[in-house]
Image (cartoon, rainbow, N blue to C red):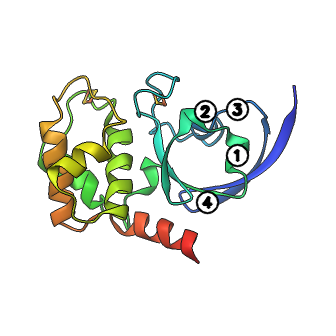
Amino acid sequence: MSHHKVRITVNGVTREDEIEARLLLVHYLREVRGLTGTHVGCDTSNCGACTVLLNGRTVKSCSVLAVAADGGEVLAIEGLASNGELSPVQKGFQQCHGLQCGYCTPGMVMAATGLLLENPHPTDDEIRQGIKGNLCRCTGYEMIVDSVRWAANNGGPGEAAVRHAQLQQS
Ligand code: FES
Ligand code: FES
């Protein structure tokens, strides 16, 4: 089994790890970095529970090999809060009851954050488009759309996500 040394920054913390070539980014985050906020819902690139930002773009981390993130920057759900305060998207889900069981929520929040980085003032249709790769079995989506609209009107993607995106431009 081939192993590779990778250097990946996750939520601002850079580390080198020796990993198997076949390790998926989602398993790297959960098992190697201990960041279990990123969920695995399907492992087949359908549900979006594993969504994170990689180098400024949303990706389904079950569809990316960890070695492909070598030298890169990941922002995962644990890195969204800034100075102990939830990001606007996290607050939006709280304010508008955008979750029930919560299983899809980390991926939804990351997908919504990526959407607001690209489009700070989306229409409801654009919100629906932005989260269409993320499945929720509980909410019927209406309150998720409300949550993202709330975030767009109350601070957008948030400081940590803006910082992450700016790093990619510098
Ligand atoms: Fe990645 Fe479902 S676990 S899309
Ligand atoms: Fe349960 Fe979305 S809140 S799957």
Callout 1 amino acid: Ala
Q: Nearer the viewer, mark 4 or mark 3?
A: 3
Q: Label 2, label 1: how many angstroms apart (C-alpha)?
A: 13 Å
Q: Label 2, label 4: how many angstroms apart (C-alpha)?
A: 17 Å
Q: Which residue is mark 3?
A: 23
- Which mark, by number, is residue 167? none
* Disc nearer the start of the sequence (4/1): 4
Viewer-closest of 29 and 146 = 146
Q: Which residue is mark 4?
A: 13
Callout 3 amino acid: Leu
Q: In which quadrant is the C terminus drawn? A: bottom right
Residue located farthest toward the right when viewing the structure as drawn: 2
Q: Is residue 131 left or right of residue 43?
A: left
Mark 2: C-beta under 8 Å from nearest atom of ligand 1: no
Find numbered disc 2 in the image and state the secondary structure of the residue it sits on.
Answer: helix
Q: Where in the figure is residue 59, as x and y percent of width and height? A: 50, 44
The residue sitting at 64% across, 38% down in the picture is 28
Find numbered disc 3 in the image and state the secondary structure of the residue it sits on.
Answer: loop
Pointer 1 local density, CA inside 10 Å: few below 14, some 14–19, many at least 20: few
Residue 104 location, quadrant: top left
Residue 152 location, quadrant: bottom left
Pointer 3 local density, CA inside 10 Å: few below 14, some 14–19, many at least 20: some
- Which mark, by number, is residue 68? 1
Q: Is residue 170 left or right of residue 115?
A: right
Callout 2 amino acid: His
